[in-house]
Every structure is written in structure tokens, then in C-alpha cells.
Image: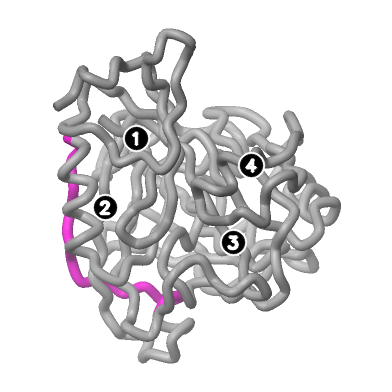
Amino acid sequence: MLKSILMVWVLAQNMVLTEQAYQDYLGYRKVDEGVVSVELARAIERPELAGRPFMTMMPASGPQVGIRVIQGGAQGYQPMKRVGWSAIELLVKDPEQLKRNLEGSLFRHLQGPDFLTEQQNILAMQVSGPNRQLFYLTHMLDPSKSFLQPEPSPAQVGHTFIMVMGSPDISASLEFWQAYFSNDVVGPIPYRIGVLSEAYDLPVETQHQLALVSMVDGYGIEIDQYPKEATSVPAPENERGGVILVSLQVDPSGLKASLPWALSYKNDEGEEEGGVVILPSGAPIEVSFTEPLLPAAIE
């Protein structure tokens, strides 16, 4: 059972400028730093990242979902041109005011704020960050009326509550989540995604197939069907950037089957504590179990 999002890993061209921008305009703060392990870099098929420095930044308050910034972004990176992780969706208090606050910053306004539904319960805008990573900045007027019901954040800019993934085959992506996890799914449904249409020079009224996988604690994974022109991951090294990994907390008692590990984390007793899995889209996830699991516990 998927419980929550723990961490989003992104590539940066300049970590100093990125830290300053996140601090000044998102209110995030650095909480730790380190280097990427050889084992993890290989598991996510990014061996060149082994030994690269990273820093983890957290919201000023509220649920502590981290953004881990890794040195290694390339100038040729273009959001949404490849399948895999494509956008970070943050809860914010006032998108209109935030749009004004971001003027003159390294965050570039793309679209919105606009209401996403006729019920006018979700107000969102899209911006690109200091390294062209894509952010959806979202205010939910009444979370109780939404399929996802995240815990509100007291911060002006709060935590990641949805991760957006582009898929070359949305049916295959959904089959994966439904094969291993017992979480609720909505869709696929046709939906207008302005930034996706713009990335592929499609008419603004174009509808794309979209699905949403819910998590126990009010988080979610949005899966978008990408146009056939989208290419696979990983990109050529001079075009790499954006989100490269998402860390999720999982209750192993709700697993339907043993996960297909690219890398397994085990404790001294040989119990599984999580690991890395490559999704059908090519995007990797890092799983952290809420409690250790004996490998034979799931057939």
C-alpha cells in the first residue's frame, strides 16, 4: 500500500543558485547534504552520478517532504520531452500572490493560476524552476471535496503532494501500480494539460489521457499519456535534468506481490527494508517500507 511521498530527487546545474532560489522564493531550507552512492546510481541507470554531491531541502513547516538537489543537470534539458518523472506538484496558500512574488526570480511563469475543474476547488499555476524543472503550484480550497485529501500546510509554499509522470503507455503504467499495490485509481480520463500541449506544439484544447493513483496519507501519482514523439529515459548526457527519482513510503502489508527490485535494501537479519524499482515508463522509484519484510512474506 502506497502511503506517502518522502523525497523528490532533481538534477541541478548550479547547486548554490538553486539553494538560494528555493530558500528565497519557496521558503525551503537545507537540512542535510551528502553524495550519491555507487549502488543507487547504478540502480537508477545513472552511473555517472556516483559520488556527486547532493543537498536536501525541506518546506519551512508542515509535512516534511524533501527535495534532494543533485549536482549534474545539463543545459540541454527540456521538460516533458521525455517520458518519466516530469513535474513536482506543491501545495501553496495563494497562487496569485506567489506569481507576483516570483517576478524577477529564477522561476519562470508558464501558465495560470487557473481553476482546474468546474467546481473551482483547485487553483493552480505552472512554473519552471532554476534548472528548468517543472513545478505545479496548487491551492486546494477544500481538500475534503477532492479525490486526494492532503494534509494542509501552514507554509506559504508547502510540500510535494503529487508527482507527475509521463508514460508512453498509460495502460501499462496503471497495470504496474495495480499489480503490486492496492491503492485506489481514477482514470484514465481525457483532460486538458496546457503545459504538455505547449511542449509538443499541440492545440491548447488537446485532451490527453490522465490517471491518478492515490496514497493513504493524501498524496498521489499523476500519470499522463505522452505523445508518441516523446523519447525514452535516460536522455543523452547533455540533455539530462529534472526529476530522476522519487522516494515513496510503502506499507508492505498491503503489497499484492513481491516488487521487482533493481536494488534491494536489507537489514542485518536479511529482512527487506525497501529498494529501487524501475517503472514501465523507465522512471525509477525508491521504496521505504514502514516495517521490515521477510522476503518470503509475499508470494
Which residue lies at the image location 38% right of the left edge and 44% below the top edge? Answer: 277
| Residue 186 on image: x %, y % | 18, 52
Sort mark 2 into few (<14), some (14-19) or many (20+) by Cα contacts within 10 Å: many
| Residue type at the position of mark 2 | Leu
Q: Are marks 3 and 4 in contact (CB under 8 Å)?
A: no
Residue to which mark 2 is pinned: 212
Q: Secondary structure at mark 3?
A: strand
Cα separation between marks 4 and 1: 33 Å
The first of marks 2 and 4 along the sequence is: 4
Q: Is residue 15 left or right of residue 64?
A: right
N-terminal of the two: label 4 or label 1? 4
Q: Quadrant of residue 101?
A: bottom right
Give left or right: position of 102 versus 279: right
* Residue drawn at point x = 59 percent, y = 74 percent: 236
- Kindly report the distance in space between the C-alpha atoms of the residues bearing marks 2 and 4: 33 Å
Mark 1–mark 3 CB contact (< 8 Å):
no
Q: CA distance from mark 2 to mark 3?
A: 21 Å
Q: Which mark is residue 218?
A: 1
What scheme was used to colour the molecule? one colour
Q: Which residue is mark 3?
A: 242
Indicate which disc, 1 or 3, sits on the residue closer to the N terminus. Answer: 1
Q: Nearer the viewer, residue 151 or 79?
A: 79
